[in-house]
Amino acid sequence: MVIYKKNDKLSASLTEKKFVTGKALCVILMISLLYVFLFSDSIKELPLAVFILMDLLIFFVVLHKTYQILYDIKLLFWFDRDFDTPLDFPKEIQLPSITFVIPSYQEPFNVAKMTFDSVVNAPYPGLKVIIVVDNSKNVLADDFVNWKSYIETSQLRHPEITVKFVYNEEQDKLKSGNLDLAHRFISPDELVVFLDVDSTLPNSCNLLERAVAEFEADKALGFIQFRIRATNCHFNGLTQAITWHQDLLRLRMISRGYGGYKIFEGHNGMWRKKALDDIGPWTSYYKGDIIITEDILKSVDAFSKGYTGKQLNIETGEWVPSSLHALDGMWSRWMYGNTQVFFKYFNKIYSERVSILSKFDISYHILHQFVIGCFFVVAFALQLLVPGGSATIFIVSMFVVPQLVGIFTSYVSLNDKSQSISIKRKVMDLYSGFFLIETFIMVTQMKSNIKFILGMSQGWKVTEKGFENAMSWMNVLRNRLFHVAMIFMCLSICFVSWFVNYGFAFDAVKYHLALLFLSFNLVWCIIAFGRQGRQEHNNVESAMLHDI
């Protein structure tokens, strides 16, 4: 039996330090209003209705981008690994058991095994229970047979751990259906860790004990989100670029949880079983379609039931997509699902239980795809309707500058000096991640917005983790039709503007360079990464979370 020693002095809570503050929010609002005021002079010749609409759209975009820039800068000076304060219990207690839930669907066996073994090896003196729920359609595939056999025979190898494999015949309920089925087998009063196939846990840092201590100290705590970092960055050029981009995204989310809205990111986090019981099933519908971002959905549900969430700045592992096809699918799901949650749970998101700071923070997260839509609308309208450099100023200040700040923040905060990668290579990867990949993702978000508005179902497909054959260029273009269409849209708008506003004057080309720069990023992204994927030499042994 493991007992925590009594500590008469109760430690500070995990969220004692506030990263998201009211002062910062005031600064963001003032900068945004000043930008709109100064920019309004360049569009004052537009009809009044258009002028007002443009000002509102510009303010929406500026508010979002200023929020991003300010907190990226704060990451450089006011956030580190020691941001958390470990807790000691004020009374003696026994460590509770932890159930680890791993939902899977047609996963490569070696990747699924990697996640399972990571759980087995993660240090925790208490009892571990592992539940695997699989809803693969092809139960005769070698990967499924090997995965099922490995789980069912693991009890002999690890008698100290309780292991259960459950097959879910309801494939139509996607990941949320697997989670609902797993919930039936979780004992009361237990803590639950949710992992994806590709997740790995650290072999040090006492992650699980640290998290358990928080739940014991705060009975209203519903969930804790661990920090997530990519572990397969070396697979190819695309994963190297995405890693810089996505690791900063994860760092932004974990840091803003200290004072802002606490978001469960869908995996690599711990929940209180009672909170899950009170919240209800994972499967939820919007207009007949399953909501495909069950992560943020559960965060909203937890707060509406009076529970709180917290972040724990200890790194755990995940894989980033190794092909553009997988990247497009992942971001399409995220953005479509966020929109579903926003419209169905608007009242819960902005309820009286949620503080002003948290409301602004969740708005930054859940309205991101709408901001991107407004960005393109404003950029196109300025290029066509307002001669001069207004479009260039807007695109540079709302796209180029935030990305440059992101590059610098990512390099300073996430640079792994143990990797033998040249500075030139890192700069290339950073540019690719924050300009090529970001532009690609922005267009994917636009596509997701349009599909939602038109009532088209997004569907759900697990992010590819197996080996991927290189596509032919014809298939690359076929799969990226919307992105190619956006390239032609940008070029066409530049051409029309150059003709209508400047009569093809050569010296007017400079007014179109910013929009052409967006097109260039998208073209180069498809050319550079369109045929890349995970290859056979990309083994799982090199793609696990190593001790920090």
Image (cartoon, rainbow, N blue to C red):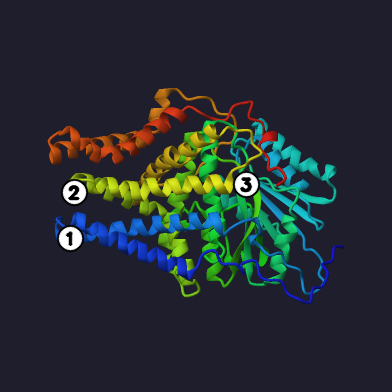
- Residue type, mark 1 in image: Ala
Circle 2 crowding by C-alpha within 10 Å: few under 14, some 14–19, many from 20: some
- Up-down: is 476 above or below 201? above
Depth check: 532 or 11 in front? 11
Q: Disc 3 marks which amino acid?
A: Asp
Dot placed on the residue nearer the N-terminal end, 1 or 2? 1
Mark 3 Cα within 10 Å, few/some/many (few <14, many 20+)?
Answer: some
Residue placed at 15% from the left, 36% from the top?
499
Residue 391 position within the rendered picture, expressed as x and y whole percent measured from the top left: 26, 47
Badge 3 marks a residue whose secondary structure is loop
Give the x, y percent position of residue 258. 57, 64
Quadrant location, the N terminus:
bottom right
> 258 left or right of 478?
right
Q: Taking the image as drawn, is residue 251 in sight?
A: yes
Q: Residue at x 15, y 34 (%)?
A: 505
Given residues 439 and 462, the one toward you in this image is: 439
The image's mark for residue 386 is 2
Image spot of residue 378 (x, y percent): 27, 50
Q: Amino acid at mark 2?
A: Val
Q: Are marks 3 and 2 in contact (CB under 8 Å)?
A: no
Residue at position x 51%, y 28% from top? 532
State yes or no: discs 3 and 1 in contact (Cβ < 8 Å): no
Q: Nearer the viewer, mark 3 or mark 1?
A: 1
Q: Earlier in the sequence, mark 3 or mark 1?
A: 1
Q: Quadrant of residue 522?
A: top left
Instruction: Please state which of the two labelled residues, at mark 3 or mark 2, is closer to the viewer.
Output: 2
**Cα distance, mark 3 to mark 1?**
48 Å
Give x and y (percent) for residue 200: 68, 45
Task: Look at the numbered disc 2 and give the secondary structure of its residue.
Answer: loop
**Residue that badge 3 annotates:** 196
Left or right of 514 on screen, residue 535:
right
- Label 1 sits on residue: 49
